[in-house]
Image (cartoon, helix red, strand yellow):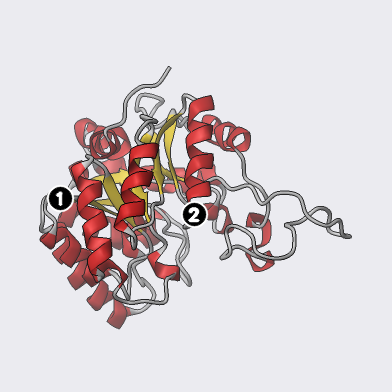
Amino acid sequence: MGGFGGCDRVIDSHLHLWELGPGPESDAGPGPASGPRPYAWLGPQHGALFRTHDESEAWDTLDAAGVVGAVLVQADDTVADTESMLAVADRNSWVLGVVGWISLEKPAEAEQELQRFLRNPAFRGIRHLVHDDPRDDFLELPAVRDSLRMVAAHGLVVDVPDAFPRHLGRTVQVARDLPELTVVLDHLGKPPLADAAAMDLWRADFRALAEPPNTVAKVSGLHLPGIPFTAEALRPLWDEALDAFGPERLMIGGDWPVCTLGAPYGRTMEVLLELAAGLTKGERQEFLEGTAVRTYGLQKRS
């Protein structure tokens, strides 16, 4: 792919890794061990996702698409997942940043974890799988707010995944209440593009989130139910995001390997690049690289 004519640098702001580990042999081959395991949300119902996706496969995939580096983002609400990503960052210069997990509900533990993870310069932010948490008010819990203040004090950001419908309005409130904290909305909040009535609700919260200057949105994870994955089908979302946030507060994200349920990684990035084709050269640079570098404080790594 190589960007537009091979001229643009592309940093993928949203990439996952996971290692399911060895398990009992079966006719289908090795699988995850029985009993409690990490990535509890991930199971056989996810098809090809239900296997290890490691750093070597990730880099081969990025390199084939002309992407120069990526931000690893947590896929499990565990310290172990964060430790694993930071170890990958130590081994791979293409990993420009890591968005991990800390014990947000336990501020004393969260501070200890922050101090430990910050020894690694690749550690740039935190995330909690709010869409898998049964509590609608997770982002409003006093302990969580205390931890988020610590996150901001350390110059880190918070990513919020799959925020619509339960958490998008609450994300707006977090951004308003904590202006010192940079809030990154993953996947445009998962807009319900196939449902016109629900889209009105999404649009109101999405626009409200764009109002505070401490918010950023990722154009990622847009393989949506009932919607073809084409630039034409996604154009209304792109136009909405561009008008609300501007290219200087939008960043491209491939969401590998989750994206492969909807399209191969190369095709995923091609569609996002096609959406951005109307931007000026400077605006493209912001969307493809600059916003991620500035938001996460990314630096070139040797």
Q: Amino acid at mark 2?
A: Thr
Residue drawn at (84%, 54%), measured in percent from left and top? 29
Q: Position of residue 96 (x, y in %)?
A: 40, 31
Q: Position of residue 276 (x, y in %)?
A: 30, 44
Q: How many C-alpha atoms fall within 10 Å of the one at disc 1: few (<14), some, or many (≥20)? A: some
Residue under numbered circle 1? 214
Can you name the residue that lies furthest to the right here? 27
Residue drawn at (14%, 65%), measured in percent from left and top? 208
Which one is nearer the viewer's eye here, 92 or 134? Answer: 134
Q: Secondary structure at mark 2?
A: loop
In which image quadrant can residue 4 be found?
Answer: top left
Q: Is residue 177 visible?
A: yes
Residue under numbered circle 2? 78
| 85 sits left or right of 13 in the view | right
Can you name the residue that lies furthest to the front here? 108
Q: Position of residue 289 (x, y in %)?
A: 31, 33
Residue drawn at (66%, 57%), measured in percent from left and top? 50
The label shown at residue 227 is none
Q: Quadrant of the C terminus?
A: top left
| 198 vs 61: above or below | below
| 138 vs 274: above or below | below
